[in-house]
Image: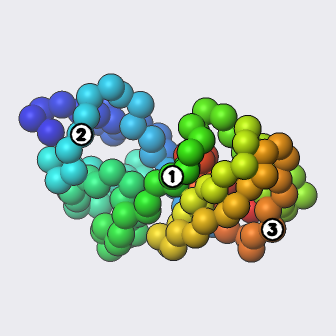
Amino acid sequence: HDGVEFGGKWPGSAMTYLGNNIYKWTYTGTATIPDGTAGLIFNSGGAQTADWTWRNGGYYTSAGYQRTIPFSALNEVSAGGFKVSVSNGQLHIEAPADCTVTVSRIDGVTFSISLRGGDNTVHLPAGFYLVSCTLVVL
């Protein structure tokens, strides 16, 4: 974007492997990158993709951009008040008060979960989820 390299000098910054052939790159800078104004290239140290248009929350395959993964949202409770963890294949959410949290699956499907103040155990199928802005792998 206007000559700025948001991922650093070529070949850029490494991605985090999440499992199941899924990788994640997180922008840690402070500048706002409007959708459609920056490009991205994936490379494996040799082969690389074309220069694709970057989209915040974008889900890409070897064919390019597929869809945007929505960010999770919280109702009436700030994200800072939640503790999200995984133990024995179950999702554990500690909420500061009774509330509803929106959970997003990696395929873009979202749903709400009602929580009680305190510790909550949530049973979900194996997969990747965004809960309170935290990526969870079950």
Q: In which quarter of the image is the C terminus?
A: bottom right
Q: Nearer the viewer, residue 14 or 34?
A: 34
Give the mark nearest the N terminus, 2 or 3: 2
Residue at 85% over, 47% down: 119
Q: What residue type is labelled 2?
A: Ile
Amino acid type at mark 1 = Ala
Look at the image and tell me whether residue 83 can be seen.
Answer: no
Percent position of residue 55, x then y:
28, 55
Would residue 125 be visible to someone looking at this image? yes
- In primary-sequence order, the first of circles 1 and 2 is 2
Q: Quadrant of residue 125?
A: bottom right
Asked if residue 11 lies left or right of residue 108, the reply is: left
The Cα–Cα distance between marks 1 and 2, rounded to whole angstroms, is 21 Å
Q: Mark 3: which secondary structure? A: loop
**Looking at the rendering, which quadrant does residue 34 occupy?**
top left
Residue 21 in which image quadrant? bottom right
Q: How many marks?
A: 3
Q: Which mark is residue 33?
A: 2
Residue at the spot of label 3: 123
Q: Nearer the viewer, mark 1 or mark 2?
A: 1
Q: Measure how far apart labels 2 and 3 are at the Cα level.
A: 36 Å
In the image, residue 8 lies at what x, y percent?
Answer: 32, 30
Residue indicated by mark 1: 73
Question: What is the quadrant of the N terminus in the image?
Answer: top left
Residue drawn at (83%, 43%) of the image: 118
Decide: few, some or many residues near mark 1? Use Cα within 10 Å; few <14, some 14-19, many ≥20: many
Q: Which residue lies furthest to the top in this view?
A: 30
In what element is the residue under mark 2? Answer: loop
